[in-house]
Amino acid sequence: MTGAAPGEGNAAWFARARRVIPGGVDSPVRAFTAVGGTPYTVVRGVGPYVWDVDGRRYIDMVQSYGALILGHAHPVVEGALSAALGAGTSFGAPTPGEVLLAEAITERVVGCDQVRLVSSGTEAVMSALRVARGYTGRDRVVKFDGCYHGHADALLAGGGSGVATLGLPGSAGVPTSAVADTVVVPYNVVPELDDSVACVVVEPVAANMGLVPPAPGFLSGLRRACDEHGALLVFDEVITGFRLGPGGAAARYEVTPDLWCFGKVIGGGLPVGAFGGPAEVLAVLAPAGPVYQAGTLSGNPLSTAAGRAVLEHMTTDAYDELEARVGRFAPALEGALRAVGLPARVPAVGPLVGLFLSDTDVVDHASARLAVEAGCYPAFFGAMLARGVALAPGAYEVLFPGMAHDDAVLEAVVELAGEAATEVVAAGAPTR
């Protein structure tokens, strides 16, 4: 049990963590504030499973919030990391690995000529916005209510995910000046732009207010509006990139942005991010151009090795297999919940799965909030955790079944969900 002292369980480890880590966690949603109870402390993971310090095994539907698509401790990733580790962990100099990962990304994403690697999705989006402003000479940024683009000051306004889970409108510590040029508009509605807008940034499939697909014509409408006013269209594909397929959401919906932001899957479970686009746009970046951006650990050789191994393993056939598997799972899960009287909507886009314990039609952040408030996610979360299924401890997150979740594992989740829903309904769950 790596790092765990004998006899210390989840409660003891969380108590220790709270003495030395603010709130006891390094990312707020992990604290179980929205669902109640004590967080489980993970000591290892294999495939679709994780084990906590008490030795309990869970079917893990979180998968590091989408950073893993092959499952925990996949031999392909472990082999790549082992080989890279023998050569060193960081150099602060160019390496072949960063070139190879950049080539793997640009080969798969049509229209993305170049990428620059960074260390997180937050950093990727923050840098893409700086490029957009530098390229256009404008300041204003349009974002959508409920879309989460990391915790950079200018983008926390109207953020979903953990911000919504904790009921925060943004964040203390963010000065008014930081969001003065950020315009927040409803998702799935093409906004009116003007010539002061540098860029429109969007999750092409919203996955931080539950799962909300783009309405027909929404993304193509954004493309036309940006073209009309000379603004750049930025796709935040930190979640959708290389999960919906090798070309991500841009390929799936046949809409090409001016800038992409990537993360999660491209690091194979290690810290990583990337932003990219046409060479003409990225020419504004230093050292060639006036837009400064840098990072000591950017292009880290361990992250690039792991990410490249994952991209090579995820063939078109693998994506097709995963999508087909999830295509069976999502309706089965919804059916199991409804069969025992628990209202549920289980949308799916490719292998991404949402879960709203309500009959509310969800098309944007306002309707997602109504669905969450009408539902009983904390009770359902607890009932599932007691049965050995780990969902995200927040109702605005999504499920991330991956290649390790075979049909047998997903069928077990459906069966256990039916049991959990029966318990929740018997306890007096909302029925709307």
Image: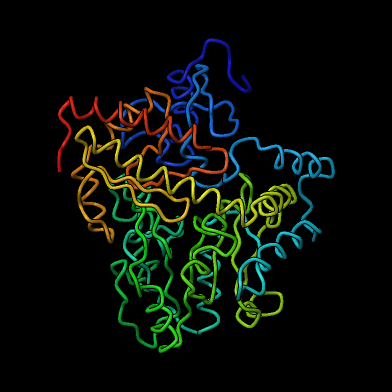
Q: Residue at x 44, y 86 (%)?
A: 227
Q: Residue at x 62, y 57 (%)?
A: 316
Can residue 21 be seen here? The reply is no
Frontmost residue, 190 versus 349: 349
Quarter of the picture holding the C terminus: top left
Q: Residue at x 36, y 57 (%)?
A: 159
From this view, report whether residue 398 is shown above or below residue 350: above
Quarter of the picture holding the N terminus: top right
Q: How far from the left and from the top, in percent, is residue 301?
A: 75, 51
Relative horizontal placement of residue 344, taking residue 284 as reference (left or right):
left
Relative horizontal placement of residue 99, taking residue 219 as reference (left or right):
right
Q: How far from the left and from the top, in percent, is residue 265?
A: 59, 51
For the view shown, which residue lies furthest in the right direction?
87
Q: How far from the left and from the top, in percent, is residue 156?
A: 38, 59
The quadrant where residue 119 appears: bottom right
The quadrant where residue 212 appears: bottom left
